[in-house]
Image (spheres, coloured by chain):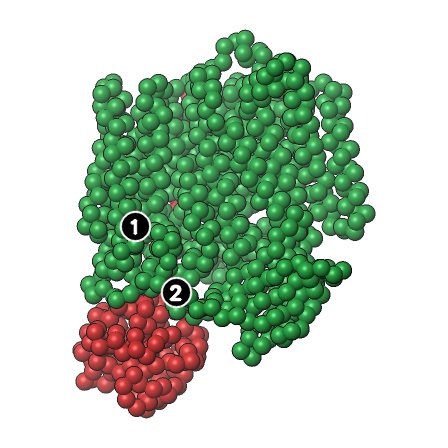
Amino acid sequence: MGQLGTYALLLGLALAGYGAVAAAFGARTARPALVDSARRSAFGLFATVAVVNGAMLVALLRNDFALRYVAENSSRQTPAFFRVLSLWAADDGSLLLWNLILAGYIAAVALRFRRDRPGTFPYALSVLFVVQAFYLILVNGPARPFATLPNPPADGTGPAPLLQNHPLMAVHPPFLYLGFIGFTVPFAFGIAALLAGHGTDAWVSIIRRWTLVVWCFLTIGLLLGALWSYSVLGWGGYWAWDPVENVALLPWLLSTAFLHSVMLQERRGMARLWNIGLVIGAFSLTTFGTFLTRGSVLSSVHAFTQTAVGPAYLAFLAVVMLVGFGLLVWRLPALRGPARLDSAISREAMFVGNNMLLLAATAIILVGTVFPLVVEAVSGEQITVGGPYFKGAVTPVFLLLLLLAGTAPLLPWRAANRARALGRLRVPVVAAALVMVATALAGVRQVTAVAGFGLATLVLVANGQEIVHGLAVGRRGGRGGVVRTLLRGRRRYAGFVVHIGLAMVAAGITASSSLGRQVDVTLKTGQSTVFAGHILRYEGLRTDEQPQRIVLSARVKVDNVGGGDAGMLDPRMNLYPAASTPIGSPSIRRGAIWDLYASLTSLQEDGDSATFRFYRNPGVNWLWFGGFVMALGGVAAAWPVRRRRDDQPPPAAARTRAAVEVGAV
Amino acid sequence: MRNILRRRTVLLGSVVAVVTAIVVLLSTGLGRDPSSTASPLIGRAAPDFTLPRLDGPALTLSTLRGQVVVINFWASWCTECHTEQAALAQTWKKFRDSGVVVVGVNFQDTTRDARDYVRTAGVSYPVVEDTNSRTALAYGLRGVPETFIVDQAGRIVDRIIGPVDATRLSDTISSLLAAGPR
């Protein structure tokens, strides 16, 4: 298996190299056959990398401990399910998955453009192959996933205990990778457009569509990461402003900015330079994130610990930024946009504001993440930037973004008729004001919390009102009118759905971060405590010996204060042979309004006494649900229903109709 | 037009400058050697221990005073420990007659697995069992393998996190031997 993997990796590198050269050379010398052979080699590359991943999977499942990676990340006791996950439980293996996903994207691009090819296609393909070649060089050189051990051990170490503790580990990394790696495609088409020097805007709808897909994956990946943190780590929260979380959020923010500003270009021919800058920026940030995570620069829960690949990532980052922004500057004369804003109260102005805010958030988080590194480089001191900085600096920006998401969709393009715009805003503003008064009366004293709930309401009602309005208009159109309306305004309605999801997420974050409560309590067997309207009684410790670990569960009976059984909680500690400290697992009673969350922090007197931390976390489920709604909206916007119309500039009549439709809003 | 071109050159230059600055900054993060971590223990007396040997009587660190001691924390379940075994064996073979002792401290393991490993890997230096991990705590162990070098006066002079490198080990020991007992 090791040999198969090693040779397949070499073959993959050769294919990527061939594809990169053939596509670019074929386009330069106008030989379509050559370009097509490059296109077809994408499928060969995908198959080859799939074989590599298969080889590693087989080695993991067959306990082939002669392979160093298997010996370090799997063991005989590891259940088969987690052996499969071991493929991405450590640096070298996850690079294989990384390569597979990238090859998958290239194959998808090759499939999508099998017939109608934009002029930028060969160059984009070439750029994609170059990026893939870089990651294949990594696994052929500095990182060697198929390295063997001179004297193989009888049994392996098993995966890191934290990573074999929860099935979410099966989906969080792949989705995050799909999101992260996917930015290569918009980047490739952006670079291709700059290389080809096309003055037209044809590339922009291609980039927009792929960015939407990637954005959906990244949204889900971030969400699953937060869910994993909440369900596994037992600290009661879901976002810790950990450097690796931050670098995953940065491209999400930039791509969100792009998805808004791209409409300026599609509709008004504005912001060309800006948009392509955002695309290059987003890919640079993913590369930077990869370097930070895998180059062993920062220490974090996520950090891999390998030094050999660090310089390679850094060099790659330098090339990406130099080529990307260098080309951008080179093509400046061709990228100048003609248009300017007609009015400060218009959709365009709102998009500009949205972009400024998202960029500000990106900058704040980037600075906070890199700051410790800067300080250490300059003064040699080690510092950490904690949650309070991020929370304090980012909260006002996010609140302003909510304000825009709740008002901008109601404003027309170009210039607004003030009276009419204000009229549409009346219901959402009144609803928001009512919610703010109600939360203040209910005893919430934090200004940001009151504002957060109010603005979330504004977003929810404003966007909901638009959907309801659209449906009402559609119903008047007779049979199938509703469906027709929804399909015709698919992108608009999808946008509203994303905003409604955002409102739920905002409400969830506001609630959980400002209204949560927690208590630390030590209970002897049979003793009970009252917390958040519940009586919690410790009923003793249960020990469960499983092949790969020992599980200690503290059983806590939950009763309502007013009487009535409310079930059990069983926070656990897991003892893994390879871990010196026990790994805790929280127990959560999830509810529509709030969760009751229990962590076992320590045990005394052989389990006769246990120390718990109980949390009352409001709104956490709104966050998961809202995030899901956002991704759903993204999928609806990206779904390829009317491929022809989207890829070509709409005929004049359609354009007018669309303008009227939006203008009427 | 000339103006645009000149501006373009300036901008290109600034792109290059900014990227260079970023790369230089980030590369300082790479310069750190994570295997040699500053430890408050370096320069201090090595915490003493008396631990049972895997096969034989207990061993007390302070009885080895006057010799250079290489304390290697390991476990049978640890792959990096397998990797560094050759380097340790080589060091032991090279220096065992010149006043150097290698001591393996078995960490979080079962006696049977530890014995199996010692037999199959052909470990010939003394190995003790840190049964309740108290010694590991005293040394502030971050994980296994981890190795401490103790000079003739019983002071810790180096701490290596992760597998040891035969050359580095040999250099440190040679310089200690050359300096002689102080």
- A498 up-or-down from B165: above or below: above
Say which element carries label 1: helix
The hue of chain A in the figure is green
Chain letter of disc 1 in the image? A
Q: Position of residue A181 (x, y in %)?
A: 40, 39
Q: Position of residue A602 (x, y in %)?
A: 55, 71
In the picture, residue B92 is in which quadrant?
bottom left
Residue in the foreground of this view, choosing between A600 and A105 = A600
Is A364 positioned to the left or the right of B74 in the image? right
- Chain letter, colour red: B
Chain letter of disc 2 in the image? A
Tell me which residue sits at (57%, 45%) in the image: A624
To which residue does mark 2 refer? A548
To which residue does mark 1 refer? A57
Q: Position of residue B117 (x, y in %)?
A: 25, 74
Tell me which residue sits at (79%, 44%) in the image: A438
The amino acid type of the residue labelled 2 equals Gln
- A495 up-or-down from A648: above or below: below
Q: Residues within 10 Å of mark 2 (few under 14, many from 20)?
A: some
- A419 up-or-down from A138: above or below: above
> Upstream in the sequence, badge 2 or badge 1?
1
Cβ–Cβ under 8 Å for marks 2 and 1 = no
Say which element carries label 2: loop
Is B175 positioned to the left or the right of B108 in the image? left
Residue extending furthest top? A653
